[in-house]
Amino acid sequence: MEEILKDFERIPDEVAIGKVKEASLEALATHHIDLTRILGEQRRARENRLVPEYIEEFFKRSAKALGIAMKRQDGFWHVTSVPFEIRNQPYDLKAKFGEVQREYSKVSFDKEKAFKGQAEFVAMGHPLLEAVVSAILSRYDRIAGEGATFLDPAGKKDGIIWFFEGKIKDGKNITAGKRLFAVYQEISEQALSFVNPAILWDFKPLNKEQSQASELSRLTDADTIKSFVVTQGLGNYKKELLERRQRDAGIKKKYGIRSLESMILDSDAKISDYETRRMKGENIPEATIQNEVRRREDLERKKQRLLKEIEAEVHLYATEPTIIGAVRVLPGKMQGEMIADEEIEQVGMEVALEYEKRQGREPEDVHLENLGYDIRSRDEMENYRYIEVKARAREGAVALTPNEWLMAKRLKEEYWLYVIVNTATHPELYVIQNPATHLKPEEEVSIVRYIVKDWKNKSERAN
């Protein structure tokens, strides 16, 4: 690749350089510039990234368990004391992430807020957070293996959620990708399905006295779950990675191999020209010919090496998934008007989807994926709405799950709350943009929900 790029720079015409780079140079990169794909990947990253609120909540809980002293100060966190055992990290962790300090005077888990407030930005890759993760895994690894018990306040789940790490490797034995799979197993029917791991945020952890984690070992065959992950999960993940790598391989073949072959032909022509001129009596130094022969051989080696590299990169295989842990989920019971009714919820979804279509947008129903919103909708200008739908037979307060509330805070202006009331008679739709800014919910710890009573005062009638 370097040889090819050097030749581009030798072109004397600046206009020609620009045209060549525009047409080919970008495409020679392993991940060439495909604007549509990049924008799509940025959108997916925005939807799926580990949001600062998750990291902050994890850190707060971990700090309490590990004896890290911290306090709120002027909208930021002041980490006043980091224990020696957290700072005393192995050499490889220090070399990779850096030293952990004894104290951090101003910390934020939000990048934008940290930048504006000139605070220490703590995220994955920061030495403090990596040290905390390492300490938590080390201290609680055995306990995590024993399982845990959670309560589903909505009363919809009665089963087990299994967590597996799936890994795909390539022909060079390099990890092409890793993914966390969460498999929900119903107790009654033993049916298996994938769920979003973030679903745990919407459940209430139970203490040891209430735990039924001991049931896990007798309720299922772990090999059956593992097989499901391999066939239904890793297979699709491998296909996803393979499509991406085949696209990149095609680019490397089209531009990288073709360019190398062109340079080899040029070198062959030079060698032939030198030999012809020598036969005609011209004094061509042997060193000149041998230099070009060596250059030609070097180009051929690069071509073969690139071909092998391309072949290895598209040869993907799944390794055996590793079980990380499992949780028993027990059905709870909502009180009064907070009780979910599938028929009412279905009416609400239909009203919301129909409204989006009338507005000229393309809505996608994703409510079964536990993403923190029910509908992903986009218009012709690629503007997105992430819509959480709440439906009521008459009127009343609505309940948001922790995951829904966190996503509302993360997506801000792109997040919408659609409330449909009077579904049993004449459905009325009310919409609220950026509910995290405009609503002040009451956190109901006992049912792990955020109750919004004054939503109507902040909403706009839409139908």
Image (cartoon, rainbow, N blue to C red):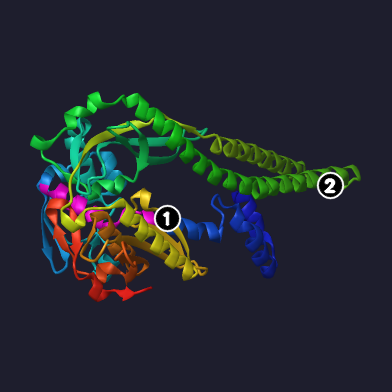
- 128 left or right of 12? left
Q: Quadrant of the C terminus?
A: bottom left
Determine if residue 372 is in view: no
* Circle 2 residues within 10 Å: few <14, some 14–19, many ≥20: few
At 67% from the left and 61% from the top, the residue drawn is 20
Q: Is residue 354 magenta?
A: no
> In the rendering, at what x and y percent does residue 292 appear?
73, 44
The reply to whether callout 1 and callout 2 are in contact (CB within 8 Å) is no
Q: Quadrant of residue 264?
A: top right
Numbered label attached to residue 273: 2
Q: Front-most of 2 and 386?
A: 386
Magenta segment main secondary structure:
helix
Separation of residues labelled 1 and 2 (CA atoms): 67 Å
Spot occupied by residue 138 in the image (x, y as percentages of width and height): 20, 36
**Residue depicted at 43% across the width and 30% down the height:** 319
Which of 398 and 232 lies nearest the eye of the viewer? 398
Q: Is 343 above or below relative to 384?
A: above
Relative placement, left or right, of 237 versus 267 is left
Q: Residue furthest right?
A: 280
Residue type beneath disc 1: Asp
| Residue kind at label 2, given as amino acid type | Asp
Residue 120 on image: x %, y %: 23, 61
Element at label 1: strand
- In the image, is residue 420 above or below residue 299? below
Residue 50 part of the magenta-drawn span = yes
Q: Where in the figure is residue 273, as x and y percent of width and height?
A: 84, 47
Residue 268 visible from this viewpoint = yes
Q: Residue at x 59, y 39 (%)?
A: 310
Residue linked to disc 1? 365
Magenta span: 45-64
In screen coordinates, is 85 left or right of 360? Answer: left
